[in-house]
Image (tube, helix red, strand yellow):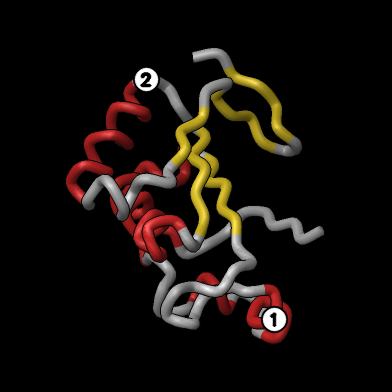
Amino acid sequence: MEQRTLGPFVVSVVGLGCNNFGRRLDRAGTAVVVGAALDAGITLFDTADVYGDGLSEEYLGAALGARRDEVIVATKFGMDMPDGSGASAAWTFAAPPRAHANSPRASPATSWIGSTRCS
């Protein structure tokens, strides 16, 4: 698959939006879609903490498994989660560094964020 430079990253020209993981697709369905994307050479996955009420990031992390280092996961945060947790702007700026990655909602398979930008 053709690749392009996106800031400091080299990613596939096609990315996979993960907004249906945890909503229309369960963990097994997510694994099938992510596996097919990886096989097709997709290296950019776009998600957010609110997708699937937090399950999108969790399912994506589990589906990537040992291949996590081969891809770029672009995630967004800043809205309150339905249960009141999450990374709203107030929570994010009040929390110590890496708190989001260490929160109970964080996926153990995707416990780090390579780059963040708040505007």
Q: Is residue 28 left or right of residue 108?
A: left
Which residue does the image show at 36% across and 29% down from the upper left?
38
Label 1: few (<14), some or many (≥20) within 10 Å?
Answer: few
Q: Position of residue 26 (x, y in %)?
A: 22, 51
Q: What residue would you read off at disc 1? A: 90
Residue 52 falls in image quadrant: bottom left
Question: Is 94 rendered above or below residue 45?
Answer: below
Q: Amino acid at mark 2?
A: Ala
Q: Residue furthest right?
A: 119
Q: Position of residue 60 (x, y in %)?
A: 36, 50
Q: Position of residue 88 (x, y in %)?
A: 62, 74
Q: Position of residue 93 (x, y in %)?
A: 73, 79
| Residue 21 appears in the rendering | yes
Q: Amino acid at mark 1?
A: Ala
Image marks 1 and 2: residues in contact by CB distance under 8 Å: no
Q: Nearer the viewer, residue 37 or 25?
A: 25
Q: What residue would you read off at disc 2? A: 40
| Residue 109 appears in the rendering | no
Q: Is residue 35 left or right of residue 42?
A: left
Residue 58 falls in image quadrant: bottom left
Which residue does the image show at 31% across and 52% down from the upper left?
23
Q: Is residue 7 left or right of residue 75?
A: right
Q: Nearer the viewer, mark 1 or mark 2?
A: 1
Q: Nearer the viewer, residue 48 or 113?
A: 48
Q: Residue furthest left?
A: 28
